């Protein structure tokens, strides 16, 4: 094939996908930034350039700060917990436990369900007076508690749902990685008289590092991307205690129809995702040279 | 510690304790689902009454099915998943082939731009994509739900990796027999990448069967709503909060995916692994 022909083929093959990507990823990313410098058109008032006013408004917006803090707590709580549990699950399911097949199924099943269904199930689980959690606490002599309705427990309750749904998903990746570790390493360690804990800490865990990083990238993205359960379970309440950034964007953009402020908020969310990506790739560069 | 050779490492007292912990966690993990299932297959008065003698019934499912147009929602979700998957398979295959096997100016830059989508996802760009769909006159259509996802950076990346791992000798053999570039793609690359296609298809369908926020925003009528949004509309409008019916509807809408998963468990798990590990 001539060089010109290769060019033409290359371009033509890539073109359809590139066009759609440009229309629904790059173009909206740019217009989001552009619109964030304007005011939202209202009845009788056209949109005007306002510079950084939307961002200044954001600094004075207590709900934005609340949503941001919530989201950071949410990430800080769900990411390590679901990754830790996933690792534990994988190690168990990979070993010779009785009932291994059942356990694997039990851990993984929540992953297949839509978040919206999961949220419905847990909403019922948490229902005051009626739900299973209440029944258990009452049977144990505890007092009634509105888990989703009180500011102190609502976010924690949502985090639990997320961990329940995600741990099994991450387990799969650990399981795959564990199965690739050579059995001779375990045999050698046994001959040397290494304890299981020592073997895990010095051999297994370092070998799983690439997997941990991959899983972490996914966990971080999900912590900022997935708010379906907020919509179903709390609508951000009580008193914005469970509002996450993307949920707040949804509220501002599609319930208050303030599209330019929503655009400014989106830019902040994108910036956070970008920073997270850079940090993680930095980590990957330093930590992963096993494979 | 748990590699196949793990048995040779002395276990000591910790084994039974670990087994117990693993089982407690496993039971905790099935509890919410088991509870939902119990509620759905028993009459309302037994929703929180756990007695073995409680009569079984499918009435809750029948009521849920009649209370909202779930048949239509099912159809919409199936159409949506088919549209997205079909589009993704065609576009991603072509683009991946272009990136993997052709030298053209701007290839590296374009590929970097494609990968940007892994971070700047359609899930986040709600406001502007809503505006674009309005300008295209597509709001409240199934096409509008699917369009932003059809050019999938993940799919392009995955297939490009796969195509690159296929030996060039195979391609050259086909060339000698007179195949053009598209025939080579169809006769050599696509068949050899079949397991990756299966994996990608499973991941894509389960993602879009479950997707919620964007469909919630862009749809507004029974004719275009997918199951997830339909379920939410159904359970959010005041039903007198009959939990038996809501859980029945919840299980109903997830049943195909759940059954598919139970039947093809091994396939599913392998697919998720294959699609995840790069």
Image (cartoon, rainbow, N blue to C red):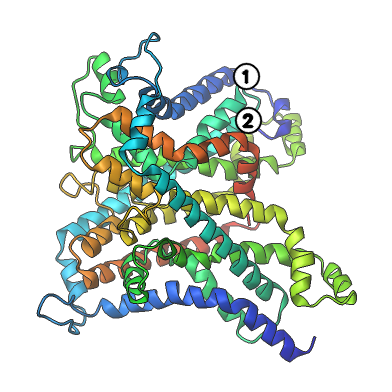
Please tell me which residue is depicted at 90% across the width and 74% down the height of the picture.
B177
Specify the subunit that label 1 lies on: B
Whether residue B119 is visible to the viewer of this picture, yes or no, is: no
Query: How crowded is the residue under tag 2: few (<14 C-alpha within 10 Å), some, or many (20+)?
Result: many
Q: Is residue B150 left or right of residue A266?
A: right
Q: Taking B276 as reference, is A54 above or below it?
A: below
Q: Secondary structure at mark 2?
A: helix
Image quadrant containing the N terminus of chain B: top right
The image shows residue B11 at horizontal and vertical percentages of: 64, 22
**Which chain is disc 2 placed on?**
A
Taking the spot 34% from the left edge, 40% from the top edge, the residue there is A119
The x, y position of residue B278, in whole percent, is: 63, 57
- The reply to whether residue B159 is visible in this rendering is yes
Query: Is residue B31 positioned above or below A186 on the image?
Result: above
Query: For residue B200, which quarter of the picture?
Result: bottom right
Q: Nearer the viewer, residue B35 or A29?
A: B35
Q: Residue at x 47, y 53 (%)?
A: B208
Quickly name the residue at label 1: B12
Is residue B216 placed above or below A111 in the rendered structure? Answer: below
Q: Secondary structure at mark 1?
A: loop
Residue located 73% across and 30% down the image? A190
Tag 2 and tag 1, C-beta contact below 8 Å = yes
Residue A285 bears which disc, if any? none
Residue highlighted by disc 2: A196
């Amino acid at each position: 094939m001539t060089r010109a022909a290769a060019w033409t083929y290359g371009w033509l093959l890539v073109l359809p996908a590139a066009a759609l990507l440009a229309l629904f990823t790059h173009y909206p990313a740019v217009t989001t930034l552009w619109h964030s410098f304007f005011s939202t058109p209202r009845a009788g008032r056209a949109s005007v350039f306002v510079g950084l006013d939307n961002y200044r408004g954001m600094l004075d917006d207590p709900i934005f700060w609340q949503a941001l803090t919530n989201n950071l707590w949410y990430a800080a709580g769900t990411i390590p917990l679901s990754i830790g549990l996933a690792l534990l699950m994988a190690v168990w399911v990979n070993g010779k436990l009785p009932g291994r097949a059942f356990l694997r199924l039990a851990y993984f099943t929540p992953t297949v369900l839509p978040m919206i269904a999961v949220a419905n199930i847990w909403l019922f689980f948490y229902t005051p007076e009626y739900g299973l959690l209440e029944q258990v606490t009452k049977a144990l002599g505890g007092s009634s508690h509105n888990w989703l309705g009180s500011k102190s427990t609502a976010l924690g309750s949502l985090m639990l749902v997320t961990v329940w749904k995600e741990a099994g998903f991450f387990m799969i990746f650990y399981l795959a990685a564990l199965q690739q570790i050579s059995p001779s390493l375990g045999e050698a360690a046994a001959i040397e008289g290494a304890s299981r804990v020592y073997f895990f800490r010095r051999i297994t865990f370092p070998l799983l590092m690439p997997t941990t990083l991959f899983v972490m990238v996914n966990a971080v993205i999900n912590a900022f991307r997935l708010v379906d359960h907020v919509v179903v379970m709390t609508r951000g309440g009580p008193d914005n205690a469970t509002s996450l950034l993307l949920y707040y964007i949804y509220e501002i953009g599609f319930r208050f129809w303030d599209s330019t402020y929503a655009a400014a908020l989106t830019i902040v969310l994108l910036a956070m995702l970008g920073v997270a990506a850079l940090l993680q790739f930095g980590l990957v560069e330093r930590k992963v040279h096993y494979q | 510690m748990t590699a196949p050779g793990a048995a040779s490492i002395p276990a000591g007292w910790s084994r039974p304790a670990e087994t117990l912990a693993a089982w407690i966690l496993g039971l905790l993990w099935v509890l919410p689902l088991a509870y939902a299932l119990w509620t759905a297959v028993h009459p309302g008065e037994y929703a929180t009454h756990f007695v073995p003698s409680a009569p079984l019934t499918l009435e809750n499912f029948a009521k849920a099915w009649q209370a909202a147009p779930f048949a239509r929602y099912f159809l919409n979700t199936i159409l949506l998943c088919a549209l997205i998957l079909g589009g993704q398979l065609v576009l991603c295959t072509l683009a991946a082939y272009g990136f993997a096997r052709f030298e053209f100016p701007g290839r590296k830059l374009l590929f970097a731009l494609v990968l940007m989508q892994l971070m700047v996802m359609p899930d986040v760009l709600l406001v502007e994509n809503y505006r674009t769909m309005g300008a295209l006159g597509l709001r409240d259509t199934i096409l509008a739900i699917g369009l932003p996802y059809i050019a999938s950076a993940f799919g392009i990346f995955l297939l490009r990796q796969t195509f690159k791992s296929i030996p060039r000798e195979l391609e050259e053999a086909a060339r000698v027999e007179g195949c053009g570039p598209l025939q080579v793609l169809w006769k050599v690359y696509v068949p050899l990448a079949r397991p990756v296609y299966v994996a990608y298809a499973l991941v894509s369908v389960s993602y879009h069967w479950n997707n919620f926020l964007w469909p919630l925003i862009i749809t507004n009528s029974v004719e275009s709503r997918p199951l997830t949004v339909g379920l939410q509309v159904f359970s959010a409008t005041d039903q007198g909060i009959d939990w038996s019916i809501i859980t029945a509807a919840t299980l109903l809408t997830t049943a195909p995916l759940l059954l598919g998963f139970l039947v093809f468990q091994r396939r599913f798990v392998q697919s998720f692994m294959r699609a995840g590990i790069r």
